[in-house]
Amino acid sequence: MGEILLNIHHLSKSFGSHEVLRDIDFTVSKGDVISVIGASGSGKSTLLRCINLLETPNSGEILYHGKNVLGGSMKPHEYRSHVGMVFQSFNLFNNMTVLENCIVGQQQVLKRSKDEARHVAMDYLEKVGMTPYIHAKPRQLSGGQKQRVAIARALAMNPEILLFDEPTSALDPEMVGEVLSVMQTLAREGMTMLVVTHEMAFARDVSSRVVYMNEGVICEQGTPAEIFGNPQKKETQDFLSRFRNV
């Protein structure tokens, strides 16, 4: 097992009287590819948003290299530069070109020079197959192309962990493969990834660990072989019975 990068302890989150996350505990080690699966409304996306401090948990700890980022030991923008996020709705800047989208964060957060930021951006845009589109605006791109740009933008910040919030759910079926292919390459290269996904084949074939969430709690977690091949909880069995042909 690799070095533990992220340790989630007793994390809970409520919106008013609605408890969305309850007593969440798990770790992310260097090189892990963890797929978080479960029905819509089970708290998966809220968990990612809490981990990236886009939502503030009501209780619990998020330890990054042993430091509690909820305790003020690290500024949120500094933490986020190490723990990047790719959203289902891309979140690109529509008034900027593809290249500008991948440069701006590097300059503002990492204080890189424009030349260095451009060089890094071009490397990652090449990696995701988007160098022919560097002067295009997001409105000129397909959904799959936008998501590949969003992944390149996140990678350009050199994060230690990359969070993916249902990265293919807003895509037409024919575009899903091109995004999953990029993610499979990152996994092979050792990128530490935490992926909320409905793509069961990805969870089964690419993950090192699978976390099944149900009604705001982690119901079961284990290797893909354990979760897909021999789930222990009835809730997990019922959920996965829909995907027997995966």
Image (spheres, rainbow, N blue to C red):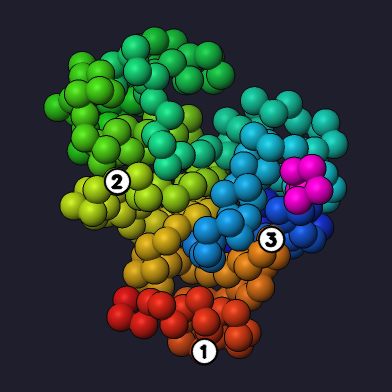
Callout 3 secondary element: loop
Q: Marks 1 and 2: CB-CB under 8 Å?
A: no
Above or below for 121 versus 155: above
Instruction: Tell me what residue is drawn at x 51 percent, y 89 percent.
Output: 230
Residue 90 visible in the shown view: yes
Outermost front residue: 17
Q: Position of residue 79 (x, y in %)?
A: 66, 33
**Can residue 67 be seen in this snapshot?**
no
Question: Amino acid type of disc 2?
Answer: Leu
Q: Which residues are magenta?
A: 13-18
Q: Is residue 161 left or right of residue 73?
A: left
Q: Is 157 part of what is drawn in magenta?
A: no
Would you say the residues marked 3 and 2 are in contact, meaning their CB atoms lie under 8 Å apart?
A: no
Query: Taken as a whole, is the magenta stretch helix, strand or loop?
Result: strand
Q: The disc labelled 3 sits on which kind of residue?
A: Gly
Residue 104 sits in quarter: top left
